[in-house]
């Protein structure tokens, strides 16, 4: 049972019991009936519950590690860093990654006396090779980075952090575990905002951290589990169940999304209304050499720059299928003008296109017509 399409459907399954559903139903409980040994079974849902454990087995299986699921992507990222670092430690985060991660570092980590350093995704491998990660306690990579889709060599950075002892975490949101397996490439933690492509229906927030099945990984897992138990930022049964249900179609969704992304990237690259198209799977893309070696399959997000803010609004007006929305990875195709949020260093007309699972030809025709209307 190794192929992606099988694992996303069957991962996390309990042994078959005749007369029970194929997919377990959510178990709704805060406290449970207690026996004489209160710790012998579920007793309270904050530290864990049956629906969460099934999801964690499924996602951990995809990551090749032991998974802890959190209420949001930011809950997962903050748990990863805060369960590892202490005052005076040095933490390295991407300068061009998800903007709330930088905000967390700037607003909260520094308040606790952690020294934060920002390094562009394209430079981190060179910084590591020069020995400049010596003394860092925690290094976070984000590859492909959101929203500009730069990639970095995870194995090269892991070689450096393994030598220095820093904990290496990879934000795998854009790729998902089907697109990339950071633990196999030497990372200590593979984490993601499962709000995006992993669950992919734009109906819930979720995140996870998977740890390697090594002594060091198990030690990190214990710290993370303790953090989640004490801070109480795990998801409830309904969201965990919805996420597991959505996971079944991840292989199919990613296949369609990447197929559409390839066509959308070519359309944008050839169109006079757009410049600077980025998609790591496009042979001409600067990310392609590393992405094609490191990633198991491509993501469904493409970015490009239109003339200005008005051009992005006009694109949405002229399109029937591409909806304005933030977030990405869902079944609907969406466009997000990133400059409107103020967190990314991108031009006013920079757009992140998230390819949904509608028909590829319909999406390309609709986007092509909307782009034509701009010139
Ligand atoms: C969205 C996102 C997050 C945060 O996830 P939430 O579920 O919104 O908290 C973290 N990292 C990346 C790369 C993201 O795209």
Image: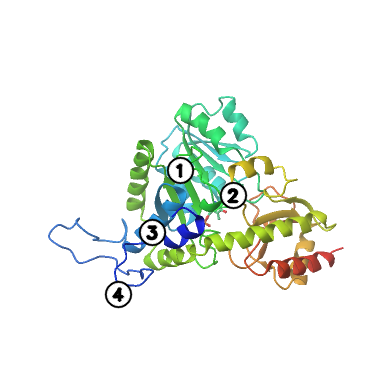
Q: Quadrant of ligand 1?
A: bottom right
127 relative to 65, above or below: above
Q: Which mark is residue 12?
A: 3
User: Label 1 vs label 3: CA separation?
Assistant: 20 Å
Q: Which mark is residue 19?
A: 4
Residue 254 appears in the figure: yes
The residue at 65%/38% (across/down) is 122
User: Label 2 vs label 1: CA separation?
Assistant: 20 Å
Q: Nearer the viewer, residue 256 or 126?
A: 256
Q: Earlier in the sequence, mark 1 or mark 3?
A: 3
Q: How far across and down, in percent of the image, does residue 62 sit?
A: 46, 52
Q: Earlier in the sequence, mark 4 or mark 2?
A: 4
Q: How far across and down, in percent of the image, does residue 168 sit?
A: 48, 38
12 relative to 17, above or below: above
Name the residue tied to disc 2: 99
With 256 as the anchor, is 137 left or right in this view?
Answer: left
- Graded by Cα atoms within 10 Å as few (under 14), some (14 to 19) or many (20 or more), the crowding at tag 3 reads many
């Amino acid at each position: 049972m190794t192929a992606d399409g099988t694992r996303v459907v069957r991962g996390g399954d309990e042994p078959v019991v005749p007369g029970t559903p194929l997919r377990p139903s959510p178990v709704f409980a805060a406290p449970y009936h207690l026996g004489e040994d209160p710790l012998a079974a579920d007793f309270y849902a904050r530290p864990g519950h049956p629906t969460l454990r099934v999801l964690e087995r499924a996602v951990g299986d995809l990551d090749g590690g032991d998974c802890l699921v959190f209420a949001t992507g930011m809950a997962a990222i903050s748990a990863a860093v805060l369960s590892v670092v202490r005052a005076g430690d040095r933490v390295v985060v991407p300068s061009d990654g998800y903007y709330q991660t930088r905000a967390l570092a700037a607003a909260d980590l520094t308040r606790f006396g952690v020294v934060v350093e920002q390094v562009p995704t394209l430079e981190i491998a060179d910084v590591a090779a020069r020995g400049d990660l010596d003394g860092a306690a925690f290094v976070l990579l984000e590859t492909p980075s959101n929203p500009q889709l730069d990639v970095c060599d995870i194995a090269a950075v892991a070689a450096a952090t393994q030598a220095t002892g820093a904990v290496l975490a990879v934000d795998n949101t854009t790729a998902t575990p089907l697109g990339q397996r950071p633990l196999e490439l030497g990372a200590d933690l593979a984490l993601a905002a499962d709000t995006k492509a992993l669950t992919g229906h734009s109906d819930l927030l979720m995140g996870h951290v998977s740890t390697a099945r090594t002594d060091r990984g198990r030690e990190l897992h214990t710290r993370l589990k303790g953090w989640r138990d004490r801070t109480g930022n795990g998801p409830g049964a309904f969201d965990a169940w919805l996420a597991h249900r959505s996971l079944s179609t991840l292989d199919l969704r990613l296949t369609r999304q990447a197929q559409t992304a390839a066509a959308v990237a070519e359309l944008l690259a050839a169109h006079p209304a757009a410049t600077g198209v980025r998609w790591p799977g496009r042979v001409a893309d600067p990310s392609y050499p590393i992405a094609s070696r490191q990633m198991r399959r491509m993501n469904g997000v493409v970015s490009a720059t239109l003339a200005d803010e008005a051009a992005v609004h006009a694109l949405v007006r002229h399109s029937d299928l591409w909806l304005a929305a933030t977030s990405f990875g869902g079944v609907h195709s969406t466009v997000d003008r990133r400059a409107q949020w103020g967190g990314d260093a991108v031009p006013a007309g920079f757009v992140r296109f998230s390819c949904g699972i509608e028909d590829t030809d319909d999406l390309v025709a609709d986007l092509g017509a909307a782009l034509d209307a701009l010139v």
